[in-house]
Amino acid sequence: MNSNYCIIMAGGIGSRFWPMSKSSMPKQFLDILGTGRTFIQMTFDRFKRVCPVENFYVVTSVDYKELVLDQLPELKEDQVLLEPLRRNTAPCVAYASYKIKSINPDANVIVAPSDHLILKEDEFIAEIQKGIDYASNNDVLVTLGITPSRPETGYGYIQIDGKTEYKNYENLYQVKTFTEKPNREMAEVFVSSGEFFWNSGIFIWSLKSILKAFDEHLEDVSGLFQKGLKLYGTEDEVHFINKTYSECQNISLDYGIMEKAENVYVLCADFGWSDMGTWGSLYENGKKDDANNSINGGDVFTYQTENCVVNVPKEKVVVLQGLDGYIVVEADNTLLVCRKKDEQQIRQFVSDVKMVKGDEFV
């Protein structure tokens, strides 16, 4: 019996990828990279190398059930766990963890977002397997830290403490601190110190260790989901979960557990990772022409245009002149043109469009 389980978190809206990503079709279900596979499909493909298909659980919004089953046809319906409300990552992981406990209390668990890019998959899987080995033999919570290539302000950071001796691992450290997204000046200090790594948001632990951590640090969340142990896998599960989510606090796994627990360790590596949270991250990882433009889509003609990310429908002819450092995206009757350096404002744009035009364009 293979005791490796994978929880894929796929409930986000991905508003920073607007207008391609919309509430009816978020970015995890899109082939933004033009590879022929969507983000969630690539995530599933990746973890199939360490977990059997029957040991996957995708946690997503009730609105995206059919999208998940359509894009991951190997999954059975009861492997798609539906959240009636958005309650952040801690309740999401608690739900899936107690569901797994009802099936296999001796499980090892990988938790991963559905929308990350991994360029060096063999190296990534090697680190995952190391993490499973360490976590299955010790009461620890393991995360993956990424060697930073630039002072990125859009990622969280992990500060490492002393190196941890385990087998012949050279890149295993105890975690000293977690830091949310820093400002530019702080990010530069972090990167130059050599003590900080990007927080990938990918976790590995034994089921026993994470449930123990929930009991210690998020007892109210743990208690709610524990009540359903005999209901998971029955026709009463949906009613129980709907009630539980209405009572559950909105809190992230990082804030609720990882920042408080003392048994947190990090495997530091560089396997070509990006969380693909923004057009800027797509630009960083995309192919570029001689003028440093990352262009995906139709017939795009550029003149005195450089350092831009362009994503337009294949049937469109687009002419751009005199732009430097812009995002140009068209999707579903919506056109976005904004400076790359101002892309953090896209959420505000989405909010304003929704207020004036309703849900049709967001």
Image (cartoon, rainbow, N blue to C red):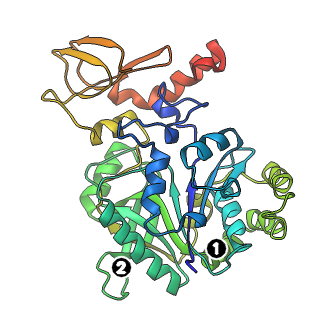
Give the residue number, with chain letter if any, for mark 2: 162
* Image-based side of 120 in relation to 23, left or right: left
**Residue 361 x, y percent position in the rendering:** 57, 19
Q: In front here: 29 or 155?
A: 29
Quadrant of the image for the C terminus? top right
Q: In front here: 279 or 316?
A: 316
Figure quadrant of residue 329: top left
**Residue type (three-letter) at the residue carrying disc 2:** Gly
For the point 49% across and 48% down, which residue is it?
Answer: 40
Q: In front here: 259 or 2?
A: 2
Residue placed furthest toward the left: 290
Quadrant of the image for the N terminus? bottom right
For the point 82% across and 65% down, which residue is it?
Answer: 228
Kindly state the secondary structure of the residue where label 2 is placed.
strand
Give the residue number, with chain letter if any, for mark 1: 213
**Residue 291 x, y percent position in the rendering:** 15, 26
